[in-house]
Every structure is written in structure tokens, then in C-alpha cells.
Amino acid sequence: MPDWHTIIRDRDFPMIEQAECDGKAMIYLDNAATTQCSRQVLWAMENYWQSQHANVHRGTYCLSEKATAALEETRLVCAEFLGAESPEEIVFTSGATASLNLLADAWALTELREGDLVLATEMEHHSNLLPWLEAARRCSAGLELVPITAEGTLDLGALDRLLDRRPKLLAVCAVSNVLGTVNPLGELVRRCHDAGTAVVVDAAQALRHELIDVKDLDCDFLCFSGHKLMGPTGVGVLYGKKEWLDRLRPPRFGGGMVRSFRFPEAEYESGPLKFEAGTLNLAGIAGLGAALEYLQAVGRKRIAARERELLAYTVHLLEAVEGVRILGKPERRAGAVSLIAPPLQAYDVALMLDKQGIAVRSGRHCAHPLHRALGIAGSVRVSPAFYNTAEEIDALAETLERTLAAAKKAGVSFGDKADG
Ligand code: PLP
């Protein structure tokens, strides 16, 4: 009897089951960038286009009401997935980047003043750094980064020293998209709230491996993207505590977010609608709902355990490959592991793996400050998901070992391409 993950890989993931690119067999190990959609997600989106497609919250006719009900049902699914108090705390966006930009803009409008301090961390993805940097610049506020240790974890002593300066907000990832470091969110929220600092959690890399309950965690905001959860691209969520969403002013304006408008006085909707100006990606939202329901149905604990096991196996094998250095040594790692193989460039290593049918990511993974802190130009990232197999990890390790040995023997001199 095959394992559950083998059964669902063959049944639910046509792209992985047939895995090939341009007629060439492929092992897909870039799930931190994007995951493949499950069949259930594809069906849900097809069903949307075939029987539900109409604009929402505007029409009085049956089809529009059906589309509105489906949208609001997905809001409930998202709220339950995150353990939110109510669906009123779920704002639909086009992804984690859009969520963080929306929040930073709203924050700049409502909360940030000249001389205020905002914190982010050295391990953030640019999507959780640049919106805060630009918001701080606009308001003549400051942005400082919590540094990382040699192990690739957050320096909590440095955080405490920064918290003495009573920052307004900390922007932090739940899981690093490069090192796979799992941050101690509960501890971070407690320390920040003691200092009167709000916490924004970028959970883009976290929700397949970590069971985050926003009510238990007590974070102020959290965001994620559908496409890293077996869902489609172009859709995501911003969670915000109700009192925060009520308090923040919307930074985007247009249809769907207006309660009344007697020129020039406009009154805006309350709750999430206030932040959802314009027409949403309704098919994407249908796919997102199906993806979250799919993960729940397969079993989130089971998925998290399987991904932990596969990643631990990956680290174990890669550590043994001559010439490879694994980045960081966090106590808890999830989702991804990155490596370098000097003097080879990350770009060249990934290219040679691709030539042999293995898809991994190279570069700085939208985390330039992190790579600068580590003193490296780029890295190779491997990120298995629950539909990958131990045999695929074996193939990765063997191919990498063979490739590095051959390069060494040949004394190949590799070019100095940018690992961007
Ligand atoms: N935050 C983290 C930690 C990520 O890894 C990513 C994408 O890789 C993002 C934010 C941005 O996600 P998206 O491109 O889906 O908006």
C-alpha cells in the first residue's frame, strides 16, 4: 500500500506526476517560490468561470448574489484557516506583497509620524522590507533592522535593545524564505506588545509547515499568498485584528469600498471592504478557498510533519556532499534550505542541476540584506513540498555530488554572473 503522500501526488498534482519541461523529465524542488496547484483548485476555478462568474456586492440578480455568497464563504474559510475571530478580519489582496504594501500605506496614512521608529529584520523578503522603508521615508520616520546571528536566527538581545526605543511596529517573517529559520513568533509578539509595538507577520513561507492561530498568537496583522499553498497566483490575504482594520484609513480608493458619496464628502465601508477597492480576483479567490480546504482535508498536521521529515532528510544528505556549505543552523527549520558551493557561483550550480532535470532556485531570493549579512553573493535554495519524494532528494544529492566532483576535476572556471 503506497504512502498517503504518494497517493495524493499521483491523484491530485498532474504537474508533479508528469513532471517535465520541454519534453525533459523534471524534479521540482522550488516550492518556496511557488507550489503546483492541486486538481481540486483547478476544478474550483473552472467551476467559477463556468457557473459563478459575475461581479460581487453590486448586483441584485441571482448570479451576482451567488458570486457574492461564494466570495464571502471563502472569507470564512480563510478566517477559519488562520483561527481569526471573524471573517471581518480577512482582506483579499493579490498576494503577500500586495498585502504588505496595502498595510504599510495604511499605516503611513494613519499611524506613522515624523521621528517614529519601525523595525523589520535582516532576514526579511524585500516584500516585507521595502514597503516599510518607503512608508518610513514618506513620514520622516526611521526603519531599523533586527540583525541575525551566525546560526541564522534573530538576535533577540538586539531586538530588546531596539524595543527600548519604543518602535511603533515590527515586521517579521514567520519562516525565512532563504534559511528556513522558524522564528519564535509567540516570544516576539510578547516582547513587542510589552513595549507597545504592533507585530506584522509575513507568513508567506509558513502556512504549510506551521499551524499558526492568529488569536492564540495575538499578532496584529498577518499575510500570505495563495500560490505557496497549492493555490493560484494573484491572490492573497491580509489578516488584521478588527480594531486595527477599523482604525486604519484606506490607502486605495474606488468602487466597492464606498458606503455613501455626496460630493465631495465620501463615507467608506467598514471592515475588509474598506480595503478592497475595485474588482477582486474572484476566480483566484475561488481557487484559494479550494486550496485551503484541500490542505485541511489532507490534514495540516500530517502535511507539516511530512514536510519537516523531507526537509530534515534534504539537509542531512546535502551536508554530506563534498564542497557544499549549508547556510545557517537554526534550531527549527521549515520549508527551505540554502547552500553555497564555492568557488562555484550559485547561478552555475542551479544551471547545471537544471541541465540534469532538477529545478532549484539560485540568486539572492529577494533577500539582499540577508545575503549581505552572510557575506555571500547568492545561494542555491532547495525547497521540497509534501508531494516530493525521498527518491527525488536522493537524486538531487547524487547529481549535486557528481556535478561538483566533475567541475572540480575539470578545474572549470565559472563566470562571474550576477546572482541576483
Ligand atoms: N514574503 C516571503 C517570505 C516570501 O517568500 C515571498 C515570496 O517568495 C513574499 C513575501 C512575496 O510573495 P508574493 O510574491 O506571492 O507576493
Image (cartoon, grey):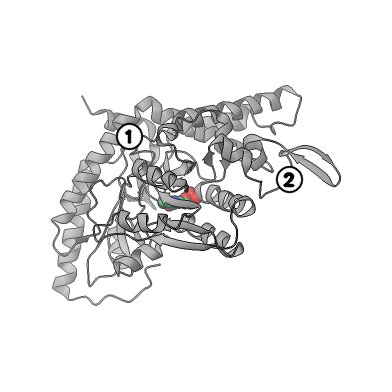
Residue bearing mark 1: 9
User: What amino acid does circle 1 point to?
Assistant: Arg
Which quadrant is home to the C terminus?
bottom left
Q: Is 405 rendered above or below residue 224?
A: below
Quarter assignment of residue 4: top left
Would you say 221 lies left or right of 401 here?
right
Which quadrant is home to the N terminus?
top left
Label 2 Cα neighbours within 10 Å, binned few <14 / some 14-19 / many ≥20: few
- State the image coordinates of residue 76 (x, y, percent, origin top left): 54, 27
Quarter assignment of residue 121: bottom left
Quarter assignment of residue 319: bottom left
Q: Is residue 389 visible?
A: no
Which residue is painted at 62% across and 41% down in the image? 247
Return the mark for residue 409. Answer: none
Q: Is 184 rendered above or below residue 400?
A: above
Relative depth, front residue between 311 and 370: 370
Q: Is residue 307 visible?
A: yes
Indicate which disc, 2 or 1, sits on the residue closer to the N terminus.
1
Q: Secondary structure at mark 2?
A: loop
- State the image coordinates of residue 381 (x, y, percent, origin top left): 31, 56
Which residue is painted at 60% across and 39% down in the image? 245
Q: Is 48 rendered above or below residue 389?
A: above
Relative depth, front residue between 190 and 53: 190
- State the image coordinates of residue 128 (x, y, percent, origin top left): 47, 54
User: What amino acid does circle 2 point to?
Assistant: Gly
Label 1 Cα neighbours within 10 Å, binned few <14 / some 14-19 / many ≥20: some
Residue bearing mark 2: 254
Relative depth, front residue between 302 and 217: 217
State how far apart marks 2 and 1 are (Cα): 42 Å
Would you say 281 lies left or right of 191 here?
right
